[in-house]
Image (cartoon, rainbow, N blue to C red):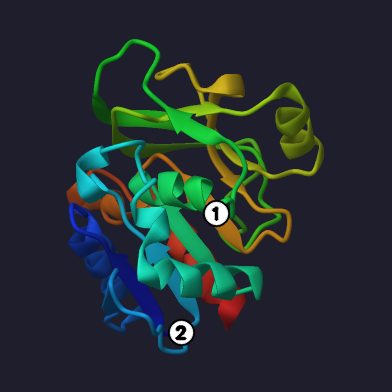
Amino acid sequence: MKSAVIVFPGSNCDRDMAVALTKITGTEPLMVWHQEYDLPAVDFIALPGGFSYGDYLRCGAMSARSHIMKEVVKRAEAGVPTLGICNGFQVLAETGVLPGALMRNANLHFVCKDVELKVENTDTMFTSGYTAGSSITVPVAHHDGNYFADDATLDALEGEGQIAFKYAVDINGAQRRIAGITNKAGNVLGMMPHPERMIEPALGGSDGAVLFTSIMNRLG
């Protein structure tokens, strides 16, 4: 599986993502700087976590307008599997590829800990390796993970099966405890938790690895 990790100024999980992809797929990803205009042909695109542009304006707002994002949006809309984790989720929301917005945590504190997630939908290329309704443990590390959308959007997400993961308990005020959503086509996933940090027992567990093997298996 040929993959690319988009790197923004302030990304701090790009190496974590690269290590996870290399270990699971056996192939090192391309590391693509945000100022590039061209994106090589790849099977999978990842937008990592971090604090791009220092989270000025709104989290992900400036990165969403980086040169490379025009190509990322084009590829995502063409069906290329695209994953945005934490800040990457914020960037995808700011581009409009995913609906809603990520707001300041309800308690106004940075949250950094392992959390329990409920797998809501296994009929996606990202979650097919999980069991529907099962619980997994994945770390979070964010200050702006409070997912917000209007009621009509939330109802549509639930009705169309676009909610991939929910927090088992409320950790940040996210509406309907949403931790991760897909686009309507199902080829784009944005999630606040960090599966790339939970890929082997030495890291505390391997629940996150299933997400990446699901993608790899779907791509053949």
Q: How many residues crowd mark 2 within 10 Å: few (<14), some (14–19), many (20+)?
A: some
Image coords of residue 146 (percent x, y): 45, 25
Q: Nearer the viewer, residue 34 or 7?
A: 34
> Looking at the rendering, which quadrant does residue 86 occupy?
top left
Report which residue position mark 1 lands on.
189
Q: Residue furthest top?
A: 107
Give the vertical position of 25 relative to 179 (above or below).
below
Q: Nearer the viewer, residue 77 or 114?
A: 77
- For the N terminus, the image quarter is bottom left
| Disc marking residue 42 | 2
Image coords of residue 20 (percent x, y): 28, 65
> Label 2 vs label 1: CA separation?
17 Å
> What number of labels is visible?
2
Image coords of residue 165 (percent x, y): 56, 38
Mark 2 residue type = Val
Mark 1 residue type = Leu
| Disc marking residue 216 | none
Query: Can residue 24 be seen in the rendering of this structure?
Result: no
Q: Residue at x 36, y 63 (%)?
A: 66
For the residue labelled by badge 1, is the local secondary structure a helix, a strand or a loop?
Answer: strand
Q: Residue furthest right?
A: 159
Q: Residue at x 47, y 89 (%)?
A: 41
